[in-house]
Image (cartoon, rainbow, N blue to C red):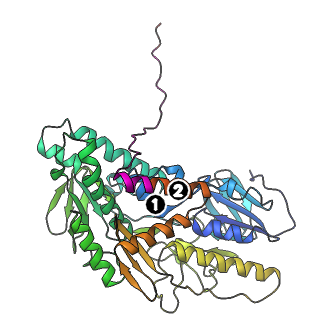
Amino acid sequence: MTINIPDTNNERIIIVGGGFAGITLAHRLAKTNYQIVLLDKNNYHQFQPLFYQVAMAGLEPSSIAFPLRKMFQKRKNVFIRVAEVLSVDTEQKEVQTSLGTLSYDHLVLAMGADTNFFGNENIAAKAIPMKSVGEALYLRNAILEDYEKAITTTDFEERQGLIDIVIVGGGPTGVEVAGALAEMKQYVLPKDYKELDCDEVDIYLIQSSASLLKGMSTEASVKAEEFLKRLGVKIRLNTRVTDYDGRYVYMNDDTKIRTDKVIWAAGIVGNTIQGIGETHLTRSRRLKVDEYNQVIDCEHIYAIGDVAQMELGEYPYGHPQVAQVAIQQAKQLADNFKARLKEKDQKAFQYKDLGSMATIGRHLAVVDLPRFKFQGTFAWMMWLVVHLFSLIGVKNRIFVFINWVWNYMTYDQSLRLIIKPFSKKKENTIV
């Protein structure tokens, strides 16, 4: 069965993935003479940098998601299909999806990355990742449900398991989650859960290396650690989590922590598709690409964003897996596709580092720019502005801004709802 896409005399470009890379490429090619088919398992784009605020009840999921069809509703040559890509036939130039088969002239893989559990099946089964809106909502429910249980639990150890949280991974996600949880402990729990002794609540941040925010400056790392300790987060550096059984986190120094919740932010691994051989993959499951983002030895197949590894120049292990790399690679690939139509030479990709940033809490953030590094209130304000204007959709920006202002003025998050999935129960039949 083939997917119902109109026949065309124009070359067809299939883009797999509606993340930063995929939607940027589709936007840039929307007015060209290519037929664009965008495939994604969701019908919306997710703004990943703010997942943690959904998990911490600071934002609604709809505020950081945007429908793909609305994004391209005025572009007649862009077709959206909600489907999972199962495999690629490079000889027949076809992709097999959950909806059927579709041929391509050019295939662009932009399906991003998933959580890396480093082969530990126990951790994969029991820890909570945060790579989608659904996972962020699951974490929000888990935290709130455990606080509800904790206020009626008299056994000290069982209560500690419910209220103590371990975050594994000291990158931007881990640091931001730890800061948000610390502020929830400080400002929200005393008001919502008066029966709970908030001094019993412990938030742990476990990092395997000697510093936080690897990849950022030493100043940023030192300040982030200082800010988190000021908020009461217990940081353990040079410590590796070896196992988690659902009750205890075990570490390589023979210590353990009692907790019912482990938030895993320790690494990512590229999403793969059957048909692209193991020889094209790195150890982190990223696809090896040349300076034009073409997958090595795969004609007419490209990879951009987190799933691509371009080992050139000052990036012998590939570019950092951040949004700016994905966006810049998509823009350059779009320019090269346009140049192809005009029979002009294509240009190699060159990454322009615009800087990096992370927020820890109210008035607490770190920013590394190419020429300047600063921390504190101004860095926090800059983080807010950059993320607000990076959101897609005017309505989303307005809603997020209103939520941020409300949270700032009231020291409160107003979205602490436990939303459970609906399941229709079978009615008892009396015979």
Q: Is residue 410 left or right of residue 281?
A: left
Residue at horizontal 39 percent and vertical 74 percent from the top: 378
Q: In the image, is residue 430 above or below residue 48?
A: above
Q: In the image, is residue 180 above or below residue 305?
A: above
Q: Is residue 373 left or right of residue 394?
A: left
Residue at horizontal 50 percent and vertical 50 percent from the top: 61
Residue bearing mark 2: 64
**Nearer to the camera, 240 or 93:** 240
First to last magenta residue range: 405-428
x, y percentage for residue 121? 33, 57
Residue at horizontal 74 percent and vertical 65 percent from the top: 36
Query: Looking at this rendering, what residue extends furthest in the right direction?
Result: 9
Q: Main SS of the magenta segment?
A: loop
Question: Cβ–Cβ below 8 Å for labels 1 and 2?
Answer: yes
Q: Check disc 2 and give the amino acid type.
A: Ile
Counting residues from the start of the chain, the first of labels 1 and 2 encountered is 1
Q: In the image, is residue 411 above or below residue 145?
A: below
Residue bearing mark 1: 50
